[in-house]
Amino acid sequence: MATDVGRRAERAADRMMGRHDETRWGVLTGEFWTSVVVILATLIAAAVADNFDAPRAWWIVGVVGAAYIVSRGLAKSGTSHRRDGDGR
């Protein structure tokens, strides 16, 4: 069932934004959802804990965000960037 949701999301993205040459649409990746969960957990921990200050929490959020951006860049760099019907 999860693959059906993924395929429907890919088709919807193709209709809205045109064909894309990404390996997977960014929102459908495990890296995206892991980053979201880690960022939310960090911000909740900073709000609740007395010994976890805001500057440290925002630094961690920045590092997680940067790591996500780098991971997507690496994932995209490994693709051949071909369109359907491209003879290469």
Image: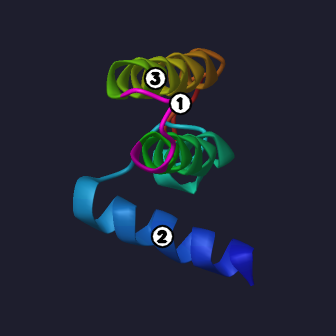
Foreground disc of the pair 3, 1: 3
Residue type, label 2: Ala
Residue labelled with disc 2: 9
Quarter in which the N terminus is drawn: bottom right
Q: Is residue 60 left or right of residue 17?
A: right
Residue labelled with disc 3: 69
Magenta highlight range: 47-53
Comparing 28 with 68, the one in front is 68
2 or 3: tag closer to the N-terminus: 2
Quarter in which the C terminus is drawn: top right
> Do the CB atoms of the residues marked 2 and 1 lie less than 8 Å apart?
no
As drawn, the label of residue 82 is 1
Residue type, label 3: Ile
| Residue drawn at 49 percent across, 45 percent down | 26
Comparing 84 with 27, the one in front is 27
Foreground disc of the pair 2, 1: 2
Task: Give me the C-alpha separation between circle 2 and circle 1.
Answer: 20 Å
> Do the CB atoms of the residues marked 3 and 1 lie less than 8 Å apart?
no
Residue 12 sits in quarter: bottom left
Task: Give me the C-alpha separation between circle 2 and circle 3.
Answer: 21 Å
* Image position, residue 86 (x, y; %): 51, 34
